[in-house]
Image (spheres, helix red, strand yellow):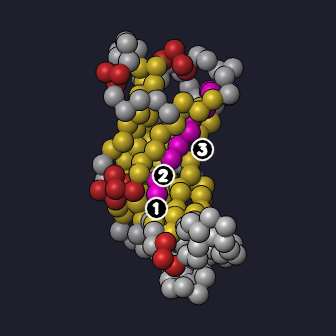
Amino acid sequence: MKKPDIKQNPNPKMRYEITVTIDDAPGPFDRIEGSVDYKVSNDRCVPLTPITGATVAPEKRVPLELTRTSDHVYKGTVFVDLLQDEDYFGMGVCHWSVVAAGVDVYVQKMGFSGSLFHDNLLAGKTDTRYFSKRSYFATDMDLINSGNAKRTDFKNPDDTFSISMKAEEKLK
């Protein structure tokens, strides 16, 4: 299967402001990195792979630029319609969809990860991940920690910090 020439939509309109909030971390972070994952949502536009016969829908990850707006808050912009719907394989138009927006915040080698998936992103819901404060100090571990969905999953729930993500639709 040929790799499609994925183009950006020259006039994206579906704009969402992503807000990342870090609450009660035991110290500062060295850096924050964001990305947005897109995937073709209608796999009938994609040919079957020759050997397995499976359909592998094209995917693309693009950077999410985040700007610090206060000590614990970062903001960035996601365009849901960033990628151009197109007939890449001569089998009909492939339609792109956002899978998720994600962030990784780092203390040396240790990363803490948060994500906001498609449905929550479009609905303006908040997704929060909780992390043990002890893990913040494990800076020599080269690891991405995805945390837990519930603070009560921890033996000491009060000894946690969180990363929350929320999207708000913005009209141009």
Q: At 46% across and 57% down in the image, what residue appears?
A: 99
Q: Is residue 33 at least partly visible in the picture?
A: yes
Give the quadrant of residue 8: bottom right
Circles 2 and 3: CB atoms closer than 8 Å? no
What is the x, y in percent for residue 79?
A: 47, 65
Report crowding for label 3: few under 14, some 14 to 19, many 20 or more residues within 10 A (C-alpha): some
Mark carried by residue 33: 3
Q: CA distance from mark 2 to mark 3?
A: 11 Å
Circles 1 and 2: CB atoms closer than 8 Å? yes
Query: What residue does disc 2 label?
Result: 101
Identify the magenta region.
99-110
Q: Nearer the viewer, residue 157 or 29?
A: 157
Image depth: mark 2 or mark 3 in front: 2
Report the quarter where the C terminus lies: bottom left
Report crowding for label 2: few under 14, some 14 to 19, many 20 or more residues within 10 A (C-alpha): many
Q: Is residue 82 at least partly visible in the picture?
A: no
Q: At 58% across and 16% down in the image, what residue appears?
A: 137
Residue type at numbered disc 2? Ala
Q: Nearer the viewer, residue 25 or 86?
A: 86
Q: CA distance from mark 1 to mark 2?
A: 8 Å
